Amino acid sequence: MKAIFISFDQAHKDDVIRILDKHLIRGYTLWEGTQGRGTVSGEPHYGSHAWPSLNNSILTIIDESKVDNLKESLKELDAESPKLGLKIFMWAAEVL
């Protein structure tokens, strides 16, 4: 199993959920209004007057067989609007 953490501009919310549905990924936790900034590029997402946008974040635990297709779909979405921002992080997970 893999833990997939997706942090993305709030404008991507419906598209990210649609991608999860497309890949039959049913279980996830969504946090709305997360704040942060990228390590390389992109504008901060602080929800402030100077930096008004915010992120959303999703954590899902999926079978390894779904990772590559999910990653490809999310990277395609990010390529459509690279300035909005979308990052994917993955690590091993055990379901207890």
Image: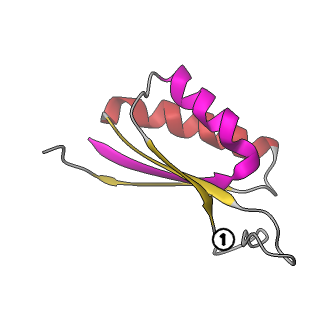
Q: Quadrant of residue 12?
A: top right
Assess whether residue 27 is covered by the magenta stretch.
Answer: no
Between 7 and 81, the one lying in front of the other is 7
**Could you tell whether 51 is left or right of 73 in the image?**
right
Which residue lies at the image location 81% right of the left edge and 47% below the top edge? 81
Which residue lies at the image location 86% right of the left edge and 76% below the top edge? 49
**Could you tell whether 50 is left or right of 41 in the image?**
right
Between 51 and 40, the one lying in front of the other is 51
Q: Is residue 39 above or below residue 29?
A: below
Q: Count the marks: how many?
A: 1
Assign the C terminus to one quadrant of the image. top left
Element at label 1 = loop
Residue furthest to the bottom: 50
Q: Position of residue 88 (x, y in %)?
A: 53, 53
Q: Which residues are magenta?
A: 1-23
Q: Residues within 10 Å of mark 1 (few under 14, many from 20)?
A: few
- Disc 1: which residue: 38
**Could you tell whether 60 is left or right of 48 in the image?**
left
Q: Amino acid at mark 1?
A: Gly
Assess whether residue 12 is covered by the magenta stretch.
Answer: yes
Which residue lies at the image location 50% right of the left edge and 30% below the top edge? 69
Assign the N terminus to one quadrant of the image. top left
Which residue lies at the image location 59% right of the left edge and 33% below the top edge? 17
Q: Quadrant of residue 27?
A: top left
Q: Is residue 77 above or below residue 50?
A: above
